[in-house]
Image (spheres, helix red, strand yellow):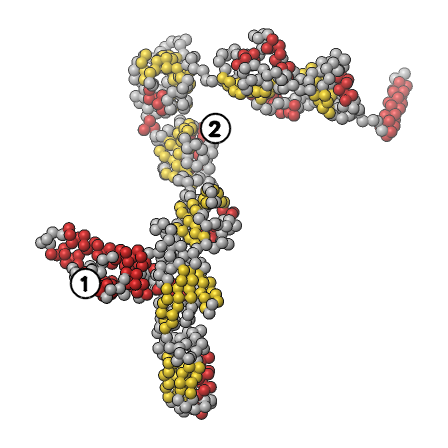
Amino acid sequence: MSDEQVVKYVKEAYASGKGEQEIGSELLSRGVTRAQMERIKQRYEASKGSTEQMVTGDANMERRTRSSLPSSFDDPNAGFMNGFSVLLEDSVAPKDTVPPTMTIFGHNVFSNRALTFEPNENMATPANYRLGPGDEVIIDVWGANETTIRQEITPEGNIMVSQIGPIYLSGMTIEDASRKIRQMLSSKYAGISGDESQISVTLGQIRSIQVNVMGEVAVPGTYRLSSFSTVFHALYRAGGISEIGSLRNISLIRGGKKIDEIDVYNYILQGKTSDDTRLQEGDVIIVPPYDMLVDIRGNVKRPMFYEMKKDESLAALLNYAGGFAGDAYSKEVRLIRRTGSEKQIYSITEKQYASWHLADGDSVTVGAILDRYANRVEIRGAVYRPGMYELGGGLTTVKELIKRAEGLTGDAFTGRAILTREREDLTHEVLAVDLAGLLNGTTPDIPLRREDVLVIPSIHELQAQGAFTINGEVTRPGVYPYAENTTLEDLIVQAGGLLDGASTVRVDISRRLKDPKSLEATTRLSETFTFSLKDGFVVDGTPGFVLYPYDMVEVRRSPGYQEQRRVNIGGEVVFAGGYTLQQKNERLSDLVKRAGGLTPSAYVRGGRLIRQMNEEEIAQRDAAIAMARMSAGSDSVSLAKLNVSDTYVVGIELDKALAHPGSNYDIVLREGDRLYIPGQISTVKISGEVQFPNTVAYIAGKGVSHYIDQAGGYSRLAKKTRAYIVYMNGTVSRVKRLRNAKIEPGCQIIVPSKKERRPISLAEVLSIGTSAASLGTMAATLYNIFK
């Protein structure tokens, strides 16, 4: 129905006293959709508002407004719009709890005016079409006998042919009906049984059928349709699926039995029409509520709600949504699930997509890829082809990037280039590049990272006459190209500003001595200037002090700046944990006192100090390792015996340190120290060359021999004279006399091994004897010769 026909029909229906519910049902049964009714209402309201705002004398505007509406709107007394909003809500809009903003995939298929699924009644009769009461059968006979018979199948299911009688055709296909009619007419026309006459059976006027559409549709009820109609056309006539209705499990009931289950997604996504079953008289279509409704949003091609079956996976949902968009992060998606009492979030990787089964109410979010390049580098400045390039393949270093950019221009400043690099925390650092050394091979090439930007200045831009050097407490100390009229403040800004520990009362500048007319040597090496700064500006000296080529700036460290130095104490103290040193000479006893003292169960003799190596100690360790690697022979240092850890144990006697604060036993602490005081320990460990390495109970007064016996005694290869004791405090004592050795709780007795002597074999004894006899014979011969 056109818009004008709808308006006319509603006017007549209201005039005849029909109710809004009845009018809505009739409109839907005639193919009017909810969208069409809403459009008519909006056009009416728009025309009404525009008419009220029109100027009285503007007749052209009124004509333009009226020309876009049906002619029935021109009647000022037309009352068809009274209650039209109620008609839309009560007769068409589904009553459910789903929010009206929810867009469910596929639900607009059966409410779209352009997609009615209306059957084509002019097509050839389908082979599987079954005849029924009301169908008109046309029988054409030609050849030796010619006649045409047109009969409508009666409610009893037969047609009446003169001189033959009734022929029952109901429920038969056209092919079966043709065969039966040929058999029945052969008794009347003799030529039909042979080849003299031909017979053709076709379908004329087709019948209509009644079907029931129930469940979650816009307007459930009984509909009279063409006998060519299918399930999809019936759903369209019922106004489409409601927002809680299922598109995946629609049932077709025939004769009280379920004969088909229809999945509309097969038609929408794959174009399969096998589920669009042709209807028969009395069929019932039942649309149940959906089983699972899942929302997918974010970077997919079709984000919306989708109805899922219980056995479908996340991969199927992504397929329904059209797959990932071009900017989607496809390696992982986020899923939020409602468990009944609270929500849960899951991060699902791409390996789990095919195996992850969804639940009703799940919400899937697909994120976007990072807004950055994985393989981009850039070069700017004095090169022939500046721009962005792909990192990888044949471009991995600064030298290769310059080559890809067709090399340096003639005015390139090769003394220093700037390489800006992005760190993982998205901050940037600036690296100085010696282009001249890099290009001639004296400086190692620099590997590039993604998002690196290389800037090569021009000598015309910088007017390079000699680079500046700035050292000390600035963010980026180094060498900077010369630029005319550069002041001290400018150079500090280029270097990233002052660090937190910079001194503002002592900034020194040393300048080269240049006297081209000098005839005598001088003992002076440079000229020095000293300044004080405030907020980065010179306040004591010459403000705006202009730098000369080759000037060297030194920003001193403030003597009053001290970074916090942390130490740690653990074990049997009242308040264990980290402490900040208050004085440079703070000692062990001070730290124990600040920690609230020892607990009653503390074993003071076992206290040990673990110290972090400083730069000097690390340098000494590395030098020892280098020497061991270069040395050769039996006297070389074994690499296996070197301590390559950044920490070591300092041997202390904590009991004496606490008894005599400030003494030599009371060691001064430094940053990174960790003092650990164990509880009472009552064991002694015996290891090395003993029969059975063991840990036994400590017994006061017992000597080393007692504990060696507890381990089964010495083994055959034990080097008894080299046995030693390692105490818990980190000190080591050699066992010189077994009786006088001091054993303490928690110590470890270690017995080293000696080299095993291999016994001389009989062959070696005979060889030595033969050699001795030969030597004796030779000596006697020599004696006789020189006698």
Asked if residue 64 lies left or right of residue 619, the reply is left
Q: Quadrant of the C terminus?
A: top right
Q: Nearer the viewer, residue 73 or 688?
A: 73
Residue 610 location (% of width, % of height): 58, 19
Q: Nearer the viewer, residue 743 or 629?
A: 743
Asked whether the viewer can see residue 171, the reply is yes
Residue lying at 41% horizontally and 14% vertically, measured from the top left: 558
Packing grade of label 2 (10 A; few <14, some 14-19, many >=20) is: few
Q: Amino acid at mark 1?
A: Ser
Residue 42 location (% of width, % of height): 24, 55
Q: Quadrant of the N terminus?
A: bottom left
Q: Give the residue number, with chain letter if any, for mark 1.
A: 71
Front tag of 1 and 2: 1
Residue, far front: 17
Asked whether the viewer can see residue 673, the reply is no
At numbered mark 1, what does the secondary structure look like: helix, strand or loop? helix
Tag of residue 442: 2
Q: Amino acid at mark 2?
A: Thr
Residue lying at 20% horizontally and 62% vertically, measured from the top left: 70
Residue 749 location (% of width, % of height): 71, 20
At numbered mark 2, what does the secondary structure look like: helix, strand or loop? loop
